[in-house]
Amino acid sequence: MPADAGRSGNTARGLTAALAACVFWGVNVAASKIAVGGFPPFAAAFLRFSMAAAVLSPAVMRARPLSRGEWRLYLPLAAVGIAGFSVTYFLGLKRTTAADASVVIGANPLATMLIELVWLRTALRGRRAAGIVLSMGGIAATTIGAATAGGDELQRIGGDLLLIVAVVAWSAYTVGNRLATRDRSPVEVAARMTMLGALILAAPAAASGQLASVRTASLGDWAALVYTGTVAAAVAYALWAAAVRDIGPTGAALSLNLVPVLGLISSAVMLGERLPLSTLAGAALVVSGILLAEWPARRRPQPAPIEAMESAEAAGGTPR
């Protein structure tokens, strides 16, 4: 097979994998909103990542054990990025709309840039800075819209603020996770992180008595939770890792613009939520900000196979 044909096939496969992962993540917000209606936040978080860990567990069966230094990295990352993120995510969804959540969570790539700026002291060039400002404006528009929407405004604003905390936790995890994927595959790291996160969440889920919800949740609640734990948290991440391997982190990242848009569509279709102008404007600003910050300034040559693998590991993360 000619080299060009091979590269073309890899690109098509990578784009398909990235788009599929983003579709699964876009639908996940509405599914999570359904799940949290039947499962309290600690129970939902524990069960979700227990399912994800079970699906991803084959990735660690033949892997070498963690070193002492890796344990010191993995434990705080799992506490912040799995346990902390998931609890604040479900607490926020309990209080606000899935449409608001789609906009706030959709700003994650820009929040990650800010964490990198502070933590890793990376350069923040003009276009990225403008993208972050646009994205923050989108979140502000959504939250202000929630404050003037009528009904229980304080509860909805509180939910939006909790989701912002969740985004910060996830972004910090994403940046720190790059250290974990230097010597291990992204899928193996994701498996270990979800296992540790589930273990951390087990105690509060049991002590709070929330696990009793497994007996009272409806079939629809269970279906939504299984989707978030297996499809969105495990299958989608494996697809994303494959996409980064085939088309690189920059090419894959552009498809993340679909997540807030698909989140809004699924919120309207699956939950019947009304999409106010402030939420639509917020989503437009967030997507514009990501495009402005992430769109390549010029066409770059495709990386060689070994460079592509290194890029995939550098962009590793864990399921949303």
Image (tube, rainbow, N blue to C red):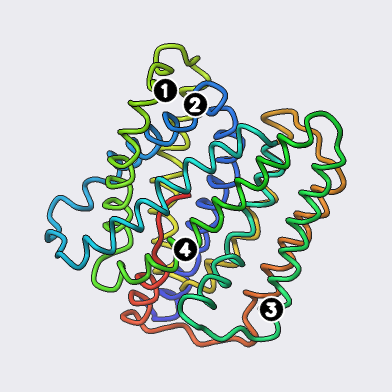
Q: Residue at x 60, y 86 (%)?
A: 299
Residue count near mark 2 (Cα–Cα under 10 Å), binned few <14, some 14–19, many ≥20: many
| Element assignment for label 3 | helix
Judging by the rendered image, the residue that carries numbered circle 4 is: 172
Vertically, is 208 above or below 51?
Answer: above
Residue count near mark 1 (Cα–Cα under 10 Å), binned few <14, some 14–19, many ≥20: some
Q: Residue at x 47, y 75 (%)?
A: 119
CA–CA distance in space, label 4 to label 3: 18 Å
Quarter of the image with the N terminus is bottom left
CA–CA distance in space, label 1 to label 2: 6 Å
Judging by the rendered image, the residue that carries numbered circle 2 is: 40
Residue count near mark 4 (Cα–Cα under 10 Å), binned few <14, some 14–19, many ≥20: many
Check if mark 3's residue and mark 1's residue have beta carbons within 8 Å. Answer: no
Which mark is first along the chain, 2 or 4?
2
CA–CA distance in space, label 1 to label 4: 28 Å
Check if mark 1's residue and mark 2's residue have beta carbons within 8 Å. Answer: yes
The amino acid type of the residue labelled 1 equals: Gln
Rendered location of residue 105, percent (x, y): 61, 52
CA–CA distance in space, label 3 to label 1: 42 Å
Which mark is first along the chain, 4 or 1?
4
